[in-house]
Image (cartoon, rainbow, N blue to C red):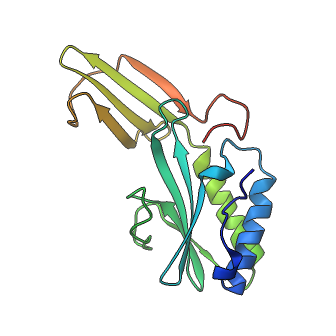
Amino acid sequence: MVQWFDTEDSALSASQALLIAAIRQRVSDLDWPLRSECSMVQIESDLLTLAIDISDPYAHHVLRTLRIDVHPDRLLMGTDATYQLVTPLQESDAGVEIAALFPNLESAAAAAVDWLMRQALRPIDLHTWERPECVYRRWVLADSEAPLLWSDSMNTPRRDLGRPNRVIRVWPPEASPNQAG
């Protein structure tokens, strides 16, 4: 099994290595629907980013990328808008949560894992419209109806389609824990 947030620890500062170790310990004890293979680490310009992709276990599309940017004094936790870890999170970004990194790395790790757990367990539904002119799919956060991703036979975002023909819960998966991601 791949280690959570697998990286060369030699590339990390001492506090970054301790933080990742504390997060690894906490997530390895969880019973949640994510796999360690879906976790990532990126170090760019002294910014450490930890991320987890949440994918539709049936269609295999990445639906959300949860990220934690580790700054020298704080953690910024939010959803990556690019799905590519291209643009760092900003405190002013919608939905970003902030946790102090010091004086206690354990409490920062606890805040990070709590945020990941809350986000990872948010249900995602797939809405499908089958019309003579198109087949349109939209993945949404079920608790807020916020759209995440769309797919269309004509590669065009559509509006005013009425009620979907089908709504299927795709996340969290019904499979046994740690099997989908």
Image-based side of 151 in relation to 30, left or right:
left
The vertical placement of 66 against 161, above or below, is: below
Q: Residue at x 66, y 63 (%)?
A: 5
In the depicted view, which residue is nearer to us: 163 or 152?
152
- Write down the quadrant of residue 68 in the picture: bottom right
In the depicted view, which residue is nearer to us: 3 or 98?
3
As drawn, the residue found furthest toward the top would be 132
Q: Residue at x 53, y 84 (%)?
A: 46
- Write down the quadrant of residue 111 in the picture: bottom right
Q: Residue at x 23, y 24 (%)?
A: 161
Q: Which residue is drawn at 62% across and 43% down?
A: 121
Image-based side of 96 in relation to 86, left or right:
right
How many numbered discs, if any?
0
Q: In the rendering, at what x and y percent does residue 127 appear?
A: 39, 27
Q: In the rendering, at what x and y percent does residue 4 appear?
A: 70, 59
In the depicted view, which residue is nearer to us: 54 or 9?
9
Q: In the rendering, at what x and y percent does residue 151 appear?
A: 32, 34
Image-based side of 14 in relation to 131, left or right:
right
Q: In the rendering, at what x and y percent does residue 14 appear?
A: 72, 85
Please identify the quadrant where the C terminus is shown.
top right
In the depicted view, which residue is nearer to us: 178 or 91?
178
